[in-house]
């Protein structure tokens, strides 16, 4: 039996499938980055778009390509590598085939969706709220992306089942975490699949006249918040398991890392109402119930923060650090595999604090739909998650391509990270500030007829354009780095997987998936059954389709 | 599974803070009535909202206790009425609905910020203490001229 092949190279066929995912993600990053740059410049009043291109078209493209395509492709490339590396050494033929089918479905969906956006047939933003009606092909394209991601998910689960069949005891930690991530994704996407298949498609095809707007929004946000944990959990895989190895240390606690993942699985789904706090049709009491559930993720978040800094300090002291903060100097600041994710962690502290404000029931009125929210998720997903994914790419791409990670690449990567953090500090800082003043998100250049209030927002919008331009330089640097990684000298690159601090056994309960999915289902029913049935029974006749762009 | 003593303290403090925080939010909402806006179904097709009361006559209505009800219709790309004139110090109960797509109803500088959903009537209350001209804007993307969708609230 071949279970402990962690130091060997990837099977070439497996690696090709994983690389296809990862490289597609970076292509999406480049195109989405161009859209983002133009948006920033338009909003700042620096440029006006040539005839034919609309601001909201760019906004739709930026959101779809960055939030859905870049993340999903990268994540599945990484998850497949994690299960291949730690659960068997090579993918089973079935897992690899599912990986390719999933890839092509998602790629076809992305291309079709992008074409519909460019044709101005789908300028509905990536949240595609009803009753704005895009071309049915746009909804079909999104459905194809999600169904493709399901096929990928089954590929990951297939590899896990195969390992489970051949082994006893608890699964290797990266495999365990990959399984939690795909389970979260499968449960979360049920909402978006339901609204697209049962509501948007029949309505956009004209088979039914009206759509229930509140039900569609509720199903969307049932998906929309766990979506952010689907981005975050792979980043946490890197923080918990990869970073300790990179800094020459060990995982603080294997069992607690798994427990944190299980808590994220359980508490990230029944919380969508905190995106709908300002909406009619849902009673304040039910909103509050989901606000409370939203805040439960504070527990695994605090566990993660503790584990990270415990690892840093323990490792630093083992390497001879003295004094209260001497360990800080022992961290490998010149290693991009550490530096990029670490900057992501640091940014997550203010980002998480901002999130607490957003989810705080009545306090949401101050920031809802303002640029504050845009600033918030540019810290969370576009910095914490993105920098961690970049940090993964520096060793994952050469490990897959049979190349080496050279000292020159470390320097380029650190420069890219610094540019990203500086650009984001300026852009997101300005967004947070002007958001508090009330400047709306998702809005083209406007002064509302030279209203003094809106004119006072302009300096912040100019700062956003400056930050956005710096970030675009960061995108170009990252794409350059990815190309350079593919051309660096042939050789082997380590796939860093840390050992645990102690060999304490993992509770068997952690892998009884029925129990965890049962708890999750119970929480979802408790949080959604009554308010959703109220919406379904509401005397609202529904909305006809509108094309307002 | 062992949990480090310091981690128990850390998580314990976090949980305690969380309980206090959620209790504060809950008390503010349920005891002091600082709820997020909420509303109910309009009862007719959204595109017919202006054919039935109260939205057939959008505008301000003065109540016996001195407060006002403001009935506002949002549409692509404006509000009806486009301007509301309110005496300083008045408490206004806004009732807003949409005849087409989803819009926003935000008055920067105040806590008025509500989603306007077709087929639903949303409610939000605000007391305008400071005289001046307030901007009323749509902060939910609603189409090509979304950035033009605005109104004014004049408090004198």
Image (cartoon, coloured by chain):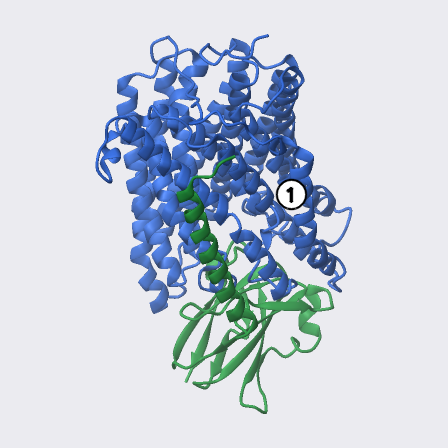
Which chain is blue in the picture? A
Q: Is residue A528 above or below residue B130?
A: above
Q: Within the image, what quadrant is residue A405 found in?
A: top left
Query: Residue A53: in sight, yes or no?
Result: no
* Residue at x-position 62% and y-position 39%: A138
Q: Residues within 10 Å of mark 1 (few under 14, many from 20)?
A: many
In the rendered image, residue A289, in percent from the top left (x then y), is placed at 60, 59
Instruction: Name the one closer to the observer, B74 or A94.
Output: A94
Q: Is residue B48 above or below residue A37?
A: below
Instruction: Name the one closer to the observer, A274 or A117.
Output: A274
Question: Circle 1 sits on which residue?
Answer: A192
* Residue at x-position 56% and y-position 32%: A110
* Residue at x-position 39% and y-position 40%: A383
Q: Is residue A516 above or below residue A20?
A: below
In the rendered image, residue B74, in percent from the top left (x then y), is placed at 57, 67
Instruction: Name the one closer to the observer, A97 or A447.
Output: A97
Colour assignment, chain B: green
């Amino acid at each position: 039996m071949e279970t402990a092949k962690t130091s060997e190279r990837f099977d070439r066929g497996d690696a090709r499938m994983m690389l296809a995912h990862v490289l597609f993600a970076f292509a999406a990053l480049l195109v989405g980055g161009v859209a983002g740059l133009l948006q920033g410049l338009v909003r700042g009043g620096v440029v006006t778009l040539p005839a034919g291109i609309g601001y909201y078209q760019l906004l739709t493209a930026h959101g779809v390509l960055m939030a859905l395509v870049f993340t999903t492709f990268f994540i599945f490339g990484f998850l497949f590598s994690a299960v291949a590396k730690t659960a068997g050494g090579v993918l089973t033929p079935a897992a690899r085939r599912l990986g390719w089918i999933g890839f092509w479905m998602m790629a076809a969906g992305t291309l079709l969706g992008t074409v519909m956006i460019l044709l101005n047939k789908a300028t509905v933003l990536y949240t595609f709220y009803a009753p704005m009606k895009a071309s049915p092909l746009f909804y079909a394209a999104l459905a194809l992306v999600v169904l493709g991601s399901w096929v990928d998910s089954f590929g990951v689960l297939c590899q896990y089942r195969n390992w489970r069949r051949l082994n006893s005891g608890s699964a290797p930690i990266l495999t365990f975490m990959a399984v939690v991530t795909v389970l979260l994704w499968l449960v979360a996407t049920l909402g978006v699949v339901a609204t697209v298949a049962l509501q948007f498609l029949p309505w956009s095809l004209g088979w039914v006249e009206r759509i229930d707007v509140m039900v569609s929004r509720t199903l969307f946000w049932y998906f929309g918040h766990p979506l952010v944990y689907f981005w975050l959990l792979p980043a946490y895989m890197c923080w918990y398991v990869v970073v300790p190895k990179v800094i020459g240390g060990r995982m603080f606690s294997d069992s607690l890392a798994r427990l944190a993942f299980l808590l994220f699985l359980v508490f990230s789904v029944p919380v969508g109402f905190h995106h709908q706090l300002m909406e009619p049709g849902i009673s304040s009491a039910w909103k509050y119930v989901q606000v409370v559930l939203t805040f439960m993720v504070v527990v695994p978040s605090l566990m993660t923060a503790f584990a990270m800094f415990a690892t840093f300090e323990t490792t630093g002291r083992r390497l001879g650090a003295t004094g209260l903060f001497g360990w800080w100097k022992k961290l490998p600041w010149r290693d991009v595999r550490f530096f990029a994710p670490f900057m992501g962690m640091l940014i997550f502290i203010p980002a998480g604090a901002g999130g607490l404000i957003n989810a705080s029931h009545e306090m949401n009125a101050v920031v809802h739909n303002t640029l504050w929210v845009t600033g918030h998720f540019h810290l969370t997903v576009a910095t914490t998650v993105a920098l961690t994914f970049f940090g993964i790419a520096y060793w994952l791409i050469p490990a897959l391509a049979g190349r080496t990670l050279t000292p020159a690449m470390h320097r380029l990567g650190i420069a890219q990270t610094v540019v990203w953090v500086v650009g984001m500090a300026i852009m997101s800082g300005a967004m947070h500030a002007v958001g508090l003043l009330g400047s709306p998100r998702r809005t083209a250049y406007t002064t509302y007829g030279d209203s003094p209030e809106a004119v006072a927002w302009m300096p912040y919008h100019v700062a956003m354009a400056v930050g956005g331009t710096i970030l675009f330089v960061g995108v170009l640097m990252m794409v350059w780095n990815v190309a350079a990684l593919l051309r660096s000298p042939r050789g082997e690159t380590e796939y860093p997987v840390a050992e645990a601090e102690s060999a304490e056994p993992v509770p068997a309960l952690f892998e009884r998936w029925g129990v965890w999915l049962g708890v999750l289902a119970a929480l979802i029913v408790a949080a959604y059954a009554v308010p959703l049935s109220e919406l379904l029974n509401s005397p609202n006749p529904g909305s006809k389709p509108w094309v307002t762009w | 599974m062992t949990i480090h003593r310091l981690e128990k303290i850390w998580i314990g403090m976090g949980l305690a803070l969380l309980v206090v925080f959620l209790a504060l939010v809950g008390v503010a909402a349920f005891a002091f009535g600082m709820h997020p806006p909420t509303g109910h179904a309009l009862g007719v097709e959204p595109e017919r909202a202006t054919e039935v009361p109260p939205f057939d006559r959008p505008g301000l209505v003065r109540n016996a206790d001195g407060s006002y009800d403001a009935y506002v219709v949002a549409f692509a790309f404006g509000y009806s009425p486009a301007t509301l004139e309110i005496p300083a110090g008045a408490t206004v109960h806004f009732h807003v609905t949409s005849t087409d797509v989803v819009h926003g109803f935000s008055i920067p500088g105040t806590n008025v910020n509500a989603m306007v959903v077709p087929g639903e009537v949303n409610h939000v209350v605000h007391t305008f203490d400071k005289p001046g001209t307030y901007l009323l804007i749509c902060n939910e993307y609603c189409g090509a001229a979304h950035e033009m969708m605005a109104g004014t609230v004049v408090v004198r």
